[in-house]
Amino acid sequence: MQNTSALYRTILADPDHWFETQLVIDGVGTFDETQLFSISTSLEMFQDSPTIGKAVAGEINVKMMFPDTTIPDMACLRPRVRVCNATDQSEWLPQGVYYIDTRERTKNDDGLDVLTIHGYDAMLKTEQLYNGRITGDSTDIEMVAEIAYQIGVELDSRTTTLMTAAFTIPFPVGYTYREILGYIASMYVGCFVMTDEGKLRLVSVLELPEETNYLIDQIGDAITFGGDRILV
């Protein structure tokens, strides 16, 4: 869960709030809802049942008016959202860091040129054989930090907090970074993902909170009636 400001939470509590979206393309510019037809992201860490031992890539799909400027190959895409009401707007919250994989130019029913983009986050950079600075056995967190360095991302602090067992990782000859991450993730009953800020994070099913069946609001706080929480 992202950290949000008091203003964000105040606006979200207003029944008459709405969300706004924009897309930042590094080196190109910022595109708002007057230029975006649709934008969606997905990260399927858990599908029909909990899955462990994977390094899961996030995806983005964008449809927008075809821009006047050239968008480079593998350009970096940074979707953001904010919450608004009639008087205020919150800070912009990042919704991932992605890289263009495919693009297509078409026309819509109104005759406008439309650019359709599909991309992935930095997890796809781990699809390469290990060629890091560690040349022997290491601890699990040392190897994960090295992989983050090799693909040019930061390590999420929650990963360091979670990975305290110091499992020994043999020198990974002939394995990709992604295979190594999956191997380490299985030790902690989890998966590796990229966060909304574009950092490498281990998520473990052991972190999941106990089910309470309490009715909650959009922020996650329990809704009360006469001071009592409501079971559903």
Image (cartoon, helix red, strand yellow):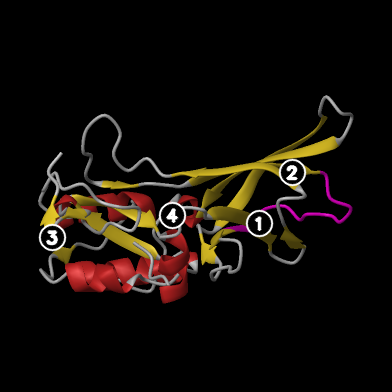
User: Label 3 to label 4, Cα distance in Å?
Assistant: 50 Å
**Which callout, 1 or 3, points to the residue nearer the camera?**
3
Q: Amino acid at mark 2?
A: Met
- Residue position for label 3: 227
Of residues 174 and 203, the one drawn nearer to the viewer in this rendering: 203
Q: Position of residue 103 (x, y in %)?
A: 71, 39
Q: At 15% across and 48% down in the image, what residue appears?
A: 214
Q: At 72% across and 52% down in the image, what residue appears?
A: 73
Magenta stretch in the rendered image: 66-79
Q: Position of residue 37 (x, y in %)?
A: 71, 40
Q: Amino acid at mark 1?
A: Leu
Q: Earlier in the sequence, mark 1 or mark 3?
A: 1
- Residue position for label 2: 64
Which of the 4 image quadrants contains residue 171?
bottom left
Which structural element holds mark 4? helix
Q: Residues within 10 Å of mark 3 (few under 14, many from 20)?
A: few
Q: Is residue 58 above or below residue 143?
A: above
CB within 8 Å, label 2 to label 1: yes
- Residue position for label 4: 126
User: Label 1 to label 4, Cα distance in Å?
Assistant: 25 Å
Asked if the magenta segment contains residue 46, the reply would be: no
Which structural element holds mark 3? loop
Q: Amino acid at mark 4?
A: Thr
| Disc marking residue 23 | 1
Q: Earlier in the sequence, mark 3 or mark 4?
A: 4
Q: Earlier in the sequence, mark 1 or mark 4?
A: 1
